[in-house]
Image (cartoon, grey):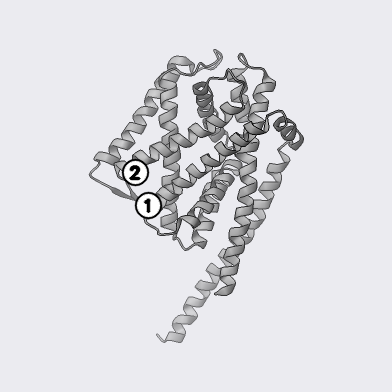
């Protein structure tokens, strides 16, 4: 077969993928502004502003700092993925991508932020799909490993008291905590002792990280959840108990995942009010949670939108230069 004939056969295939990518990009740019619009409609901006005015500026600055540190811890998840996959992208490119993904993940759900943004932005930087999948998988495991360890400890040690109307009860919660610790221990033992280090699933290779990396995963994941709870605790009345706040956050986060509501709108509030209404006034709880949402969800989302526009503009400039 001549070179010209081969080129004619390959051209339609290239055109096919060109149009698939083009349509996907158009759909992406339609979907994101639409989701942002509906997200903004669900926020009572006057209530947010009024609530924030009730806090001293120093508390809000400290809260914003805690949120920022938490987001950089999340960026460390992807930096760990960089070491895990050895993909070679510089840190200055990984951090903005991870920040954008985390902000959109929290506000719009894992499918949009954790998956769609990560594949789009990393692929624009030259990573292939298998590598992006491994970074995404490691990031998810890091996040939930930290959750399992913290929640297991809080539940097993009985550091949170549930309302009597909740069916699971204190004993059931302790059993759940022990079960979570067993899961975390099984993962760490597998990373340290397993002789088989890789598996193949749907064409993707899954590599078991070494024990040292798994311990770093556990530390980063637990630190991130602890910082989220610390921000809520900072906004709460003075006699709030930090382990209780952390435990309720653990419960509300699972409830948010089960309901598939972006940012857990309404879910976190219901769980916290139900669990703490016998200790604090509903107005105090709502104020704390509104401030938490403003500092941990809305502010980072605004920053992420700016970073995303910069990344897209930079990518467009590079394409025009090629």
Q: Position of residue 133 (x, y in %)?
A: 43, 52
Residue at 53% from the left image edge and 57% from the top image edge: 121
The disc, 1 or 2, on the residue closer to the chain's N-terminal end is 1
Q: Secondary structure at mark 1?
A: helix
Which residue bears the numbered disc 2? 213
Does 172 sit above or below residue 290? Answer: above
* Place of residue 318 in the rendered image (x, y in percent of width and height, measured from the top left): 56, 69
Residue extending furthest toward the left = 195
Quarter holding the C terminus? bottom right
List the residue tagged with mark 1: 83
- Does residue 247 appear left or right of residue 303 in this picture? left
Q: Mark 1 and mark 2: span between their CA atoms?
A: 9 Å
Q: How many labels, in total?
A: 2
Q: Determine contact: label 1, label 2, CB under 8 Å.
A: yes
Instruction: Identify the image quadrant of residue 259.
Output: top right
Residue visible at 64% across and 23% down?
Answer: 285
Q: Please name whichever residue, 107 or 51, is drawn nearer the observer in this view of the structure.
A: 51
Q: Which quarter of the picture shows residue 62?
A: top right
How dense is the environment of label 2, judged by Cα within 10 Å: few (below 14), some, or many (20 and up)? some
What number is the disc on residue 231? none
Instruction: Tell me the crowding category of disc 1: few under 14, some 14 to 19, or many 20 or more residues within 10 angstroms, Cα based.
Output: few
Residue 250 is left or right of residue 49, and the answer is: left
In the image, 282: left or right of 220?
right
In the rendered view, tell whether residue 238 sits above or below residue 225.
Answer: above
Q: Nearer the viewer, residue 162 or 78?
A: 78
Q: Residue 174's x, y, as percent?
A: 42, 19
Residue 35 appears in the figure: yes
Which of the two residues, 238 or 109, is positioned nearer the viewer here? 238
Secondary structure under tag 2 reads helix
Tell me which residue sits at (39%, 40%) in the image: 217
């Amino acid at each position: 077969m001549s070179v010209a004939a081969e080129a004619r056969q390959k051209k339609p295939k290239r055109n096919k993928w060109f149009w698939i990518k083009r349509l996907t990009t158009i759909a992406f740019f339609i979907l994101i502004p639409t989701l942002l619009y509906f997200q903004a409609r669900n926020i009572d901006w006057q209530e947010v502003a009024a609530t924030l005015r009730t806090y001293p500026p120093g508390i809000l600055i400290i809260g914003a700092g805690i949120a920022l540190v938490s987001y950089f811890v999340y960026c460390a998840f992807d930096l760990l993925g960089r070491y895990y996959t050895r993909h070679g992208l510089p840190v200055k490119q990984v951090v903005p991508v991870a920040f954008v993904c985390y902000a959109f993940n929290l506000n719009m759900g894992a499918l949009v932020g954790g998956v769609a943004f990560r594949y789009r932005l990393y692929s624009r930087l030259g990573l292939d799909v298998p590598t992006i999948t491994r970074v995404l998988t490691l990031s998810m495991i890091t996040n939930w490993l930290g959750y399992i360890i913290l929640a297991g400890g809080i539940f097993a040690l009985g550091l949170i008291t549930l309302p009597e109307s909740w069916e699971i009860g204190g004993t059931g919660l302790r059993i759940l905590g022990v079960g979570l610790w067993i899961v975390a221990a099984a993962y760490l033992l597998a990373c340290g002792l397993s002789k088989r280090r890789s598996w193949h699933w749907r064409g993707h290779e899954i590599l078991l990280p070494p024990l040292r990396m798994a311990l770093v995963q556990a530390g980063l994941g637990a630190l991130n959840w602890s910082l989220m709870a610390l921000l809520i605790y900072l906004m709460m009345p003075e006699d709030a108990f930090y382990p209780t706040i952390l435990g309720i956050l653990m419960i509300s986060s699972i409830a948010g995942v089960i309901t598939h509501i972006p940012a857990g709108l309404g879910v976190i509030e219901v769980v916290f009010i139900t669990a703490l209404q016998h200790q604090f006034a509903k107005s105090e709880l709502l104020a704390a949670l509104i401030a938490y949402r403003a500092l941990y969800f809305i502010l980072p989302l605004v920053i992420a939108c700016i970073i995303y526009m910069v990344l897209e503009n930079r990518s467009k400039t590079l394409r025009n230069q090629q």
